[in-house]
Image: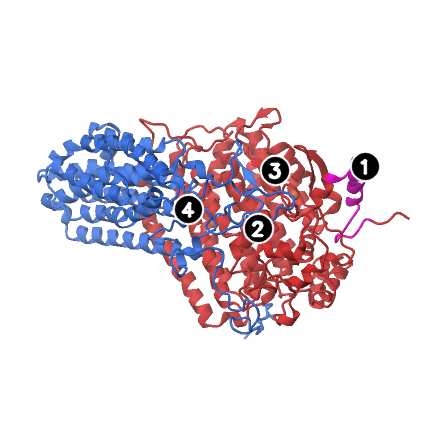
């Protein structure tokens, strides 16, 4: 046995510094007290999200301390044309002797702060969700590989997946990074921006899922050409209008609201679900493919069960805003009139794809009708009118 | 996923890179930097297929430890001295984290290399993780630590307290102004690469020494992401360096970012580590020693200096000066003393220093007692309400300092104070380097070159201005730093929770009104102002009045 020189370690002490050890003012005040919860009780999600992004109309008494060259500071409410009740009230002015808290302050001061992500996403939830999706996809593909499932595919279907399912990854990628993630610098509250990141994260993940699926297929199917999607995406006329649409989303000038709206309210039901559900999901089985639907299904679930819910919670209150309903409805109707024709053009551009597989999906016109009626449902949930352009 | 398959997967997702064909993305964020579009490698080499399960696994460990800490009654051994400072730290840090997430999109279109965007997107997701996991840790403290006051009002406090403006530079600096200055140089090259070691490694070690092993659990998990972000910054920096025209801007931004991080981070973290601990083993490293190792050796000597050969102009003078501030000019001690002087404007309790603390300080910082010992003895003797005022209003040889217009830490090393009339207002700065930041760096022109995208300093930058002429009881009420009996203050200059020994608004009511040094400065005549400045730079150390001439 060798002697070990006396080790230097911190000495722990019994301090009895745990809740309930003493009674004194505030000894039981154990919830965040600076915001009003949406429901009776504050949720875990609210606790980790609300008010992290400051607001000079709340407690930010000295204002934002850095600005852009043009004088804009923080998260200007003018970064969308939509408005929420209370926002046209002048910002509290502070100066010598003014004090900090706005006069007659009552939280939330304006309507934007009422938004809560109905999916209640924060880090614990989105990693669990993302990890589960990835595990599920991996498992499905492993099983398919072991069952030699890819050998069952019709040759034309191989080409279809290689090119067109492949092309779709680009759409998800652009939406994920350059539309949703990009918007997370722009929203008026931390709840908006976090919800937009989560939506972006779904899309980036789905884009990568499609890319990695493509990689697997090029290993499993001899005739599968892993880079064919690039050529299709760049030069197949069927994809041109869809690509124009998503690129146009990135070119919207300074309106995060329009970007999210034109993506999730217009593009997703009229083009996204049309392609994913009404074309790929409906054709795969008949062409011997039971794997692709499980990959596509994850992206479909992201949108239909989570991102759409979030979107409706984000925009419906603005269409019914107690102060700016008319203003907002006019703006959103304008967006519908602008984007619906472009989405329909993108949808119709994809029409030739319906005749490519050997086993044909239901007719394009029927698929488009279904997409339109899905879209109509969303529009009425938002409290908006169907745009006349939908009849085109 | 195996390492090899991650590499292949990562290779594959490069096919997602997007080149716009029909529409040019709207350039919402501007920069004065120029980048050549060239094939670049994504330094993160991550795919979400392996990223999500990896992060989930890290989460499991964090949340498992959280449950264990509560079941194991961790709070029976946590030092209150330490946890009180977490009311400040954890009120600050979720905003810098979420701001880092918000800053990533500013790079998407200003850095024209799509290969780098995947790494930026992963960093963005990481940062949302950090912000919410830290809010959650604070929530756990609020629910389980003996005194929840200050945790329960955390974000309101952070938004209206003077410490908030100091902390917010380390957040707003990431998201405004020139996109590269903000999201790349300030955030990744300086804040993350240099200063997160003190934040996320040194601080957790000190937490553990004070009985809190949850902070290390959470922050080491955070740091394991942070280190990946450093490679994002490095890739962008190398690209910027490859264009000669950027060198001047890089020099400016490195000077600004370095100095600002030093002023802000060393002030806060230095105080937590030196004055928030009960661990007074002589062989535990002091903040100065940690700084020398992690910031001076690891960052400056090993990371920055090798970049010199690529044309990076390194602020050697400011790095040496930061060390000089910490080692010779007592920067951290001056800041801690100021926090304690102004305890009544805070939302946490500050424990007095004891003989054991004195001995440690004297050992680690020879000469400490002569400078600061007497004042801390006075702090101790004035800590219980007993007919006297809080220390700020008692005569203890301390002159209340003016605030630095730029870093918003007061001008504590008095001899360095710079006064100037800028934009029609008399301002004080803690140091020539902060004055330069306002007068030279944050301007639309820099050394004869147009810098139309450079940010601006904005806001009511002196906290005292808002309360000029107010009674202290009203100030504290306005900020909301009052407990649920309607009169006992959240802040206390001691740790005794006996209600009879706690300060209340009634004690504050008896004090003189709060006066804003900057308002008073601007009301002075020119002669008075000159005399004021001449006196100020002769004050100190430890805030002592200037010696009277014999
Ligand atoms: Fe972080
Ligand atoms: Fe300063």
- Mark 4 — on which chain does it sit? A
Q: Do pointers 2 and 4 mark residues of a single chain?
A: no
Residue A185 on the magenta span: no
Count neighbours of disc 1 (C-alpha within 10 A) and say few if under 14, some if 14 to 19, many if 20 or more. Answer: few
- Mark 1 — on which chain does it sit? B
State the scheme by which the image is colored: by chain
Q: Earlier in the sequence, mark 3 or mark 2?
A: 2
Q: Earlier in the sequence, mark 1 or mark 2?
A: 2
- Mark 2 — on which chain does it sit? B
**Which chain identifier belongs to the blue chain?**
A
Marks 2,4: beta carbons within 8 A: no
Q: Which residue is mark 1?
A: B527
Q: Which residue is mark 3?
A: B255
Q: Secondary structure at mark 1?
A: helix
Mark 4 to mark 1 CA distance (whole Å): 51 Å
Label 3 or label 4, whichever lies nearer to me, is 4
Q: Do pointers 4 and 1 mark residues of a single chain?
A: no
Q: Secondary structure at mark 3?
A: helix
Question: Residue B184: x and y, percent?
Answer: 50, 39
Q: Which residue is mark 4?
A: A111
Query: In the rendered image of this protein, does residue A332 appear above or below residue B495?
Result: above
Residues shaded magenta: B523-546
Q: Quadrant of the C terminus of chain A?
A: top left
Colour used to depict chain B in the structure image: red
Residue B145 can be seen in this image: yes
Count neighbours of disc 3 (C-alpha within 10 A) and say few if under 14, some if 14 to 19, many if 20 or more. Answer: many
């Amino acid at each position: 046995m060798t002697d070990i020189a006396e080790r230097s370690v911190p000495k722990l002490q019994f301090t009895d510094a745990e809740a309930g050890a003493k009674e004194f003012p505030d000894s039981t005040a154990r919830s965040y007290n600076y915001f009003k919860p949406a429901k009776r009780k504050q949720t875990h999600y609210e606790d980790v999200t609300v008010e992290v992004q400051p607001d000079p109309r709340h407690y930010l008494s000295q204002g934002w301390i850095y600005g852009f060259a043009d004088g804009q500071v923080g998260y200007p409410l003018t970064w969308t044309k939509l408005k929420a009740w209370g926002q046209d009230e002048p910002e509290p002015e502070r100066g010598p002797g003014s004090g900090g808290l706005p006069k007659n302050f009552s939280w939330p001061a304006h309507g934007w702060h009422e938004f809560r992500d109905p999916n209640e996403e924060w880090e614990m939830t989105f990693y669990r969700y993302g990890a589960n999706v990835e595990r599920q996809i991996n498992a499905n593909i492993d099983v398919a590989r072991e069952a030699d499932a890819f050998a069952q595919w019709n040759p034309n279907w191989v080409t279809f997946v290689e090119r067109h399912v492949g092309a779709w990854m680009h759409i998800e990628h652009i939406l994920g990074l350059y539309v949703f993630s990009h918007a997370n610098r722009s929203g008026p509250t931390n709840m908006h921006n976090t919800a937009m990141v989560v939506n972006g994260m779904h899309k980036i993940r789905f884009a990568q899922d499609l890319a990695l699926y493509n990689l697997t297929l090029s290993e499993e199917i001899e005739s599968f050409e892993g880079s064919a999607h690039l050529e299709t995406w760049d030069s197949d006329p069927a994809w041109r209008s869809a690509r124009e649409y998503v690129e146009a989303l990135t070119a919207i000038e300074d309106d995060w609201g329009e970007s999210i709206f034109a993506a999730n309210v217009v593009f997703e039901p009229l083009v996204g679900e049309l392609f994913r559900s009404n074309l790929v999901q409906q054709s795969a089985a008949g062409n011997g493919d039971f794997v692709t639907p499980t990959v596509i299904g994850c992206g479909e679930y992201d949108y239909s069960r989570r991102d759409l819910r979030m979107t409706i919670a984000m925009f419906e209150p603005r269409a019914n805003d107690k102060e700016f309903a008319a203003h907002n409805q006019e703006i959103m109707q304008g967006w519908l009139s602008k984007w619906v024709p472009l989405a329909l053009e993108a949808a119709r551009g994809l029409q030739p794809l319906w005749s490519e597989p050997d086993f044909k999906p239901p007719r394009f016109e029927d698929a488009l009708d279904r997409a339109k009626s899905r879209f109509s449902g969303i529009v009425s949930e938002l409290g908006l009118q169907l745009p006349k352009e939908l009849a085109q | 996923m195996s390492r090899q398959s991650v590499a292949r997967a990562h290779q594959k997702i490069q096919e997602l890179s997007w080149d716009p064909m029909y529409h040019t993305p709207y350039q919402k964020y501007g920069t004065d930097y120029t980048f050549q579009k060239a094939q670049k490698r994504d330094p993160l080499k991550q795919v979400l297929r392996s990223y999500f399960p990896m992060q989930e696994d890290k989460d499991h460990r964090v949340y498992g430890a959280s449950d264990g800490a509560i079941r194991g009654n961790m709070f029976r051994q946590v030092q209150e001295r330490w946890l009180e400072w977490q009311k400040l730290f954890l009120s600050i840090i979720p905003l810098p984290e979420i701001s880092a997430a918000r800053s990533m999109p500013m790079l998407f279109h200003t850095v024209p290399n799509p290969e780098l965007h995947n790494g930026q997107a992963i960093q963005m997701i990481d940062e949302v993780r950090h912000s919410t996991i830290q809010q959650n840790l604070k929530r756990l403290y609020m629910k389980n630590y003996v005194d929840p006051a200050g945790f329960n009002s955390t974000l309101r406090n952070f938004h209206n307290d003077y410490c908030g403006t100091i902390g917010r530079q380390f957040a707003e600096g990431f998201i405004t102004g020139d996109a590269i200055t903000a999201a790349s140089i300030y955030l990744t090259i300086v804040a993350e690469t240099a200063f997160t070691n003190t934040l996320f490694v040194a601080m957790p070690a000190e937490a553990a020494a004070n009985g809190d092993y949850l902070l290390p659990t959470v922050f080491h998990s955070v740091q394991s992401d942070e280190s990946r972000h450093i490679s994002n910054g490095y890739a962008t920096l190398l690209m910027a360096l490859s264009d000669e025209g950027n060198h001047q801007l890089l020099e400016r931004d490195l000077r600004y970012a370095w100095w600002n991080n030093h002023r802000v981070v060393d002030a806060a973290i230095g105080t937590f580590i030196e004055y928030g601990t009960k661990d007074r083993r002589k062989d535990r490293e002091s903040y100065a020693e940690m700084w020398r190792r992690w910031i001076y050796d690891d960052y400056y000597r090993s990371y920055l200096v090798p970049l010199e050969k690529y044309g990076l102009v390194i602020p050697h003078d400011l790095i040496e000066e930061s060390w000089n501030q910490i080692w010779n000019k007592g920067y951290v001690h001056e800041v801690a003393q100021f926090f304690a002087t102004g305890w009544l404007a805070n939302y946490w309790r500050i424990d007095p220093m004891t003989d054991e603390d004195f001995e440690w300080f004297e050992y680690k910082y020879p000469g400490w007692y002569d400078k600061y010992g007497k004042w801390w003895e006075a702090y101790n003797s004035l800590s219980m309400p007993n007919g006297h005022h809080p220390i700020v209003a008692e005569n203890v040889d301390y002159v209340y300092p003016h605030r630095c217009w730029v870093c918003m830490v007061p001008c504590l090393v008095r001899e360095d104070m710079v006064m100037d009339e800028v934009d029609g207002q008399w301002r004080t700065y803690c140091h020539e380097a902060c004055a330069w930041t306002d007068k030279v760096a944050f301007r639309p022109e820099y050394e004869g070159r147009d810098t139309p995208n450079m940010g601006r300093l904005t806001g009511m930058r002196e906290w005292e201005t808002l309360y000029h002429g107010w009674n202290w009881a009203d100030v504290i009420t306005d900020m909301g730093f009052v407990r649920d009996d309607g009169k006992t203050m959240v802040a206390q200059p001691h740790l005794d929770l006996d209600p009879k020994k706690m300060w209340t608004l009634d004690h504050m009511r008896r004090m003189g009104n709060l006066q804003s040094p900057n308002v008073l400065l601007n009301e002075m005549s020119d002669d008075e102002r000159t005399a004021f400045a001449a006196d100020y730079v002769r004050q100190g150390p430890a805030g002592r009045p200037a010696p009277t001439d014999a």
